[in-house]
Amino acid sequence: DTGVSQDPRHKITKRGQNVTFRCDPISEHNRLYWYRQTLGQGPEFLTYFQNEAQLEKSRLLSDRFSAERPKGSFSTLEIQRTEQGDSAMYLCASSLLVAGVNTEAFFGQGTRLTVV
Amino acid sequence: GNSVTQMEGPVTLSEEAFLTINCTYTATGYPSLFWYVQYPGEGLQLLLKATKADDKGSNKGFEATYRKETTSFHLEKGSVQVSDSAVYFCALSVSRAGSYQLTFGKGTKLSVIP
């Protein structure tokens, strides 16, 4: 397993367009997290999945954002009607929760979104 | 709520100097504490962690001790190398409703010069 992979690594889009990012977690991991990191800040939690169920969404996740993990494997994060304020690095992380113990979160390299 | 405050950078040190990056936290509940490192062009990597008071996490010569009385988790290394140049993030995780989401500080950029 090569770790958490994210695609694309970079995305430039015009304001108002829709974009979709993909995350492939470590194969045996049942938890998947999305974070957003803006310049000069630490990552901020957006949402997470336990298998295919989306269990929590941050207030940062406006109604223009939607995330899915349809078969409990890869996940997609879609942003509709992008705004310049959406420009950021979008990070995906995965972990394994077993018997109430969560392993460390492994992060992908992120997708850098620039909205022009 | 939960929050992490870490010393602002950038920090520039000469090779073999002693490193301290301060980190303090506030948390509802009993957090686990982490230091993550982000090398240029790479993703976040876990550097070390501590899950209960007085635990010391260590890895690659870095150490941090979970101090509940001062709500701190300062990162230290006795002798830094050029290869340690990176951005370091302090983070906490609380099992609130089982989410284990991470709350990060803003990061501290370290540059080590030969």
Image: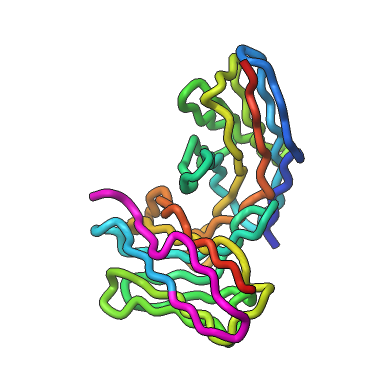
Task: From the top left corner, tell me how far across and down residue B28 is, in percent.
Answer: 66, 58
Question: Would residue B40 appear left or right of A30 to someone viewing this image?
Answer: right
B41 vs A75: above or below: above
Q: Camera-side residue: B12 or A97?
A: B12
Question: Which quadrant, please, contains the N terminus of chain B?
Answer: bottom right
Residue B107, position in %: x, y? Answer: 66, 44
Report x, y in % for residue A55.
Answer: 45, 76
A3 inside magenta stretch:
yes
Quadrant in which the C terminus of chain B appears = top right
Residue at (60%, 39%) from the top-left corner?
Answer: B88
Q: Which residues are magenta?
A: A1-20
- In the image: residue B110, left or right of residue A4: right
- The image shows residue B111, relative to residue B39, as above or below, that is above
Of all residues, the one furthest to the top in this rendering is B16
Number of numbered discs present?
0
| Residue A98 image-quadrant placement | bottom left
Residue at image coords 54%, 84%: A17
Q: Say which residue appears at 60% left-offset and 64% top-offset.
A: A88
Judge from the rendering whether residue B110 lies leftward or rightward of residue A102; answer left or right.
right
Name which residue lies at 55% across and 75% down. Answer: A13
- The answer to whether residue A57 is magenta is no
From this viewpoint, is residue A2 visible? yes
Residue A7: percent from left, percent from top: 38, 64
In this rendered view, identify the residue nearer to me: A76 or A81: A81
Using the image as rendered, state which of residue A71 and residue A111 is in the foreground. A111
- A85 shown above or below B108: below
